[in-house]
């Protein structure tokens, strides 16, 4: 079974030779694996046996796609957002529309002239599409883009204090993601459209679920709909306690929910599977906040095995992944433990790494 | 007191202009700044904290109430200082080195200000030495450390150690919070307390301040 066949089959709840895997690594974790496997960092996913390859073509490229060598290095993205490398990731240092006038906010234009440049980022993975499952990530799709522009406080307060402005900003943000999605779906032979919009915290959603339904949800739905119109699976990423809006996500056509942070209220993976598993697949769930960095390899293997059993009880609908990026303080044995639970042995991984080295040498 | 109900309600509903107008009117009427604070603004914010804790309010409501509170506090502050009214305690808050996530830290600041604490915000990506230096300069009673990332949690321990090395650890209380943080972690690194959310942080700060 190729990776592509495996992921499609799992999402259709058809039999698979093993559960599909799509891990996100902290850059330092990737580096540790690369050194151990004696391969370039860019080949780690190949050696590990991950089934999905995906590129950020939306604003997330500026956050994680651009990798600076030095701490403190900065860049300004196409939206005018200034990012600084801080502790491996780029984080926002300057929000272009924070503390500006309402008029200036209303005048703001998303960088439609850069869409071609953004889409070009897909090119390196497209040739892999005969065997691997290919995704295109157009996130952030609505609210998350708005808070990158005007800062979290203003974005949240405007939801209640200036609904008209808030809706306009959300419409503009989702309009850009929608255009990216349309062009990506028309141009590239992708397997899923990846959407994302972080609106939840550790304990609950940032805003009232009803306010999300009134303002953010309808804008996100437009982007999701692009994938559905093209007959693709649509995946959606939102960290934290998203339970209250899962029915809305399903209704708008989301097929796969990520990252399933089981330690947040209402996000127990097995409960979600029971309640929504008939209509929704899941990707994630292996805890990055405690289990992976602090647990033993034995515990990780046990939890992963239980996760696989519970989350595929109806024959599929699950992609093995951590509940976010695997932090770099995670013992490497814990990473292997997840793969071993999925039937990917350490030996198999080292064999693939050896093949990668051989292919590079010849 | 009944006359402050409208001011309390304006805080609860986050109406900043109304809070400014009412606070000014009470001052013009000769009401003491301390009374307006204790009977208008703080009880209003207490309701906001309770509504947040009970799940009725979310972050936008809390931010709007905080913005309204600040309008009132700005009017009262010079008068409180002139009459030598002391805050409940002085708290220095900041997100630890390597981490620039500030939503949680800002919510804690809001709730503490609303509870009558004086809050000095050190910002984000704050080094252990900066925490020590700022705590000294402002003679704070409590230091609040925030971290969202598991990768930056060790900065909390380094900050606690920095206070020890400086010899000022026994003069201040340290409370910590953030998504990956736990009571066990607080104990492990020698902090004085952990609060799970902004609303509980104020209770923790009161305990630590002995009020």
Image (cartoon, rainbow, N blue to C red):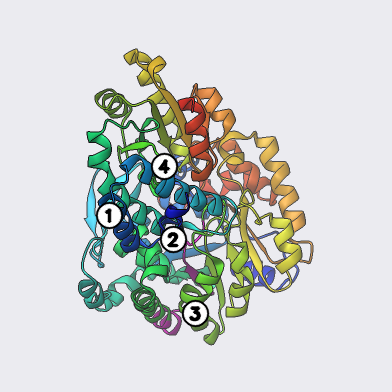
Name the one closer to the observer, A218 or A136: A218
Q: Viewer-nearest of labels 3 and 4?
A: 4
Distance (Cα) linking label 2 and label 4: 24 Å
Q: Which dot marks residue B24?
A: 1
Distance (Cα) linking label 2 and label 3: 19 Å
Q: Circle 3 sits on which residue?
A: A218
Label 3: how many residues lie within 10 Å, few (<14), some (14-19) or many (20+)? some
Q: Is residue A121 left or right of residue A323?
A: left
Q: Secondary structure at mark 4?
A: helix
Q: Circle 4 sits on which residue?
A: B38
Give above or below for B195 relative to A356: above
Q: Viewer-nearest of labels 2 and 3?
A: 2
* Residue A196 is a magenta residue: yes
Distance (Cα) linking label 1 and label 2: 26 Å
Q: Are circles 1 and 3 on residues that touch, CB within 8 Å?
A: no
* Residue for point 50% across, 58% down: B58
Label 1: how many residues lie within 10 Å, few (<14), some (14-19) or many (20+)? some
């Amino acid at each position: 079974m190729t990776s592509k066949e495996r992921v499609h089959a799992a999402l259709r709840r058809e039999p698979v030779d093993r559960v599909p895997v799509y891990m996100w690594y902290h850059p330092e974790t990737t580096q540790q694996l690369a050194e151990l496997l004696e391969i370039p960092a860019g080949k780690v996913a190949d050696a590990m046996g991950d089934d999905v390859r995906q590129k950020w073509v939306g604003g997330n490229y500026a956050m994680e796609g651009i990798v600076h060598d030095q701490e403190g290095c900065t860049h300004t993205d196409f939206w005018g957002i200034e990012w600084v490398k801080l502790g491996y990731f780029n984080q926002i240092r300057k929000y272009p529309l924070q503390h500006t006038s309402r008029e200036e906010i209303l005048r703001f234009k998303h960088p439609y002239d850069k869409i071609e440049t953004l889409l070009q980022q897909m090119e390196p993975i497209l040739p892999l599409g005969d065997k691997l499952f290919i995704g295109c990530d157009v996130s952030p799709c609505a609210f998350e883009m708005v808070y990158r522009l005007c800062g979290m406080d203003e974005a949240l307060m405007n939801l209640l204090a200036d609904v008209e402005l808030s809706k306009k900003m959300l419409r503009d943000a989702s309009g850009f993601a929608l255009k990216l999605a349309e062009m990506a779906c028309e141009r590239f032979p992708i397997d899923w459209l990846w959407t994302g919009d972080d609106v939840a915290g550790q304990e609950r959603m940032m805003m009232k679920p009803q306010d999300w339904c009134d303002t953010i949800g309808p804008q996100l739905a437009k982007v999701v709909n692009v994938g559905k119109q093209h007959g693709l699976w649509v995946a959606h990423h939102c960290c934290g306690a998203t339970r209250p809006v899962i029915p809305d996500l399903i209704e708008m056509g989301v097929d796969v929910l990520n990252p399933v942070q089981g330690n947040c209220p209402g996000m127990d993976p097995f409960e979600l599977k029971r309640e929504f598993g008939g209509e929704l697949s899941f990707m994630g769930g292996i805890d990055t906040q405690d289990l992976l960095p602090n647990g033993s390899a034995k515990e990780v293997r046990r939890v992963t095995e239980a996760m696989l059993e519970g989350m595929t009880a109806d024959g599929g609908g699950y992609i093995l992944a951590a509940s976010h990026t695997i932090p770099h303080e995670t013992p490497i044995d814990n990473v292997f433990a997840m793969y071993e639970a999925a039937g990917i042995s350490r030996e198999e991984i080292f064999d693939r790494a050896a093949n990668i080295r051989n292919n590079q040498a010849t | 007191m009944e006359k402050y109900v409208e001011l309390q309600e304006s805080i609860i509903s986050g109406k900043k202009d109304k809070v400014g107008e009412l606070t000014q009117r009470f001052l013009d009427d000769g009401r003491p700044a301390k009374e307006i604070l204790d009977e208008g603004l703080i009880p209003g914010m207490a309701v906001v904290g309770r509504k947040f804790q009970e799940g009725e309010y979310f972050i936008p409501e809390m931010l709007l109430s905080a913005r309204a509170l600040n309008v009132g506090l700005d009017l009262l502050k010079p008068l409180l200082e002139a009459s030598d009214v002391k805050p409940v305690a002085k708290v220095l808050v900041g997100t630890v080195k390597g981490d620039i996530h500030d939503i949680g830290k800002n919510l804690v600041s809001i709730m503490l200000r609303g509870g009558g604490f004086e809050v000095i915000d050190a910002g984000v990506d704050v080094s252990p030495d900066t925490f020590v230096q700022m705590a000294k300069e402002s003679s704070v009673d409590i230091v609040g450390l925030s971290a969202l990332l598991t990768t930056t949690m060790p900065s909390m321990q380094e900050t606690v150690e920095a206070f020890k090395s400086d010899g000022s650890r026994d003069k201040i209380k340290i409370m910590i919070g953030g998504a990956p943080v736990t009571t066990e972690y607080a104990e492990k690194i020698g902090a004085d307390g952990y609060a799970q959310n902004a609303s509980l942080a104020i209770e923790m700060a009161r305990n630590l301040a002995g009020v």
